[in-house]
Image: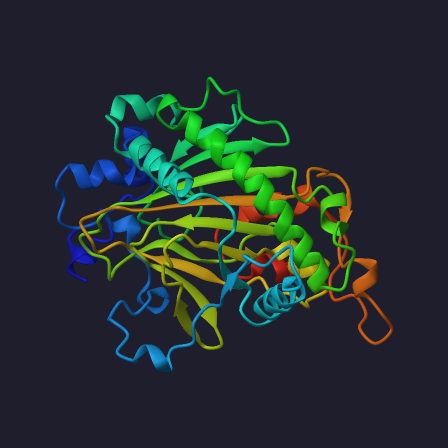
Amino acid sequence: MAATTVIGEHDYDRAQEIKDFDNTKLGVKGLVDSGLTSIPRFFIHPPETLPDVRPDTKPDSQQTPIPTIDLAGLHTHHRSSIVDQINHACRKFGFFQVINHGIPSAALDRTISAIKAFHEQPAEDKTRVYRREIVTGVRYISNFDLYSSKAASWRDTLTIRLGPTPANPLEVPEICRDAAAEWDQEIQRLGGVLMELVSEGLGLNAWRLRKMTCLEARVMVGNYYPYCPQPDLTVGIASHSDPGVLTVLLQDQTGGLQVKYGEGWLDVKPVPGALVINVGDLLQIMSNGEYKSVDHRVLANPKREARVAIAVFFNPSNTEDTYGPLSEMVSPEKPALYQQFTLSELMQRFFNKGLDGKALVNHFRL
């Protein structure tokens, strides 16, 4: 913890140090490339919020795994079993992985390679899209909540708006332009399948979430986690739940994603060819608490090889419509647990509050 005492309390200007870092437009990777051996003070998290980064000594047989669900039999008599597995995972874990999802492994590899290539290209090629706002639909940034969070996290991010109004293709960096467009096509198809399965798991018409435009608003977030010289003092992403309906995550084989389960944390161990799916806050609310959006986090990367993970967040496109528990999920035996609100209210509160556990769902609880 010596890094916290290098500068005296009275000499340390946190706001200025953050501003200076932001103004470099080089992100966390720029710090790593500079050869630093200790992280800047504003990246250090309070000890009580830091994960235990010591290796889990429990054998695999004693660890609770996040379910991996095989979608191969989706259009056969196995569909009902797949729905049951997803239903169970959404209720118990809020997370699951899918294999045999129909996206070629070559497309997975191209997407990861393209996002990695963007982050590892010369700095002058990246800084063109380094900005705090996302009016163009494209943004490269380190920590969207840099100025409001209690401590920064060790990652850089490329964000691309995919729908309903996609970013101008010419705004998308050329090095990942084709891969992002291809990934959007693949993820729309899979997203539609997942929306149907989730709807069926709740006992709803298969097209219930599709008709609510839950497939239309999509944002792609390419996170880059470079080597961290002091991974025990910071995190890759702080504990939070996602605000939307569903998230589809493509991660490389590095590992580091953890999911809250009971009083502890489960590793979401990479499965070759798999995609990670998780329930968002809005789906928890619409299901009236039947499905759970859960806290998750990413450890700071202790490895020399950077970790890359690409998330696509699905939300309704009708931002001014009113949302809350679906009428089919409310009964005299189970009244509504959440109030009504617009999606604009939900997202504004998320971005104003930053990554702060389950604060969003709790805010809208009756």
The residue that appears at 53% across and 20% down in the rendered structure is 168
Q: Compare residues 365 and 95 and report the one nearer the observer.
A: 95
Residue ID at (19%, 62%): 1
Q: From where the camera sits, is residue 364 visible?
A: no
- Residue in the image at 57% along x and 46% along y: 190
Q: Is residue 206 above or below residue 177?
A: below
In the figure, is residue 347 to the left or right of 327?
left
Front residue (pair 172, 191) = 191
Q: Quadrant of residue 267?
A: bottom left
User: Is residue 70 visible to the viewer in this orientation of the structure?
Assistant: yes
Q: Which residue is found at the position 73% from the left and 62% from the top?
A: 338
| Residue at the far right in the pictured view | 332
The image shows residue 129 at horizontal and vertical percentages of 39, 24
The image shows a total of numbered marks equal to 0
Q: Quadrant of residue 282?
A: bottom right
Q: Is residue 142 left or right of residue 219?
A: left
**Where on the picture, by quarter, is residue 143?**
top left
135 up-or-down from 349: above or below: above
Report the front residue among 86 and 338.
86
Front residue (pair 253, 310): 253
118 relative position to 263: left or right: left
Task: Identify the image's colour scheme: rainbow, by chain, secondary structure or one colour.
Answer: rainbow
* Horizontal and vertical percent position of residue 22: 33, 34
| Quadrant (top left/top right/bottom left/bottom right) for the C terminus | bottom right
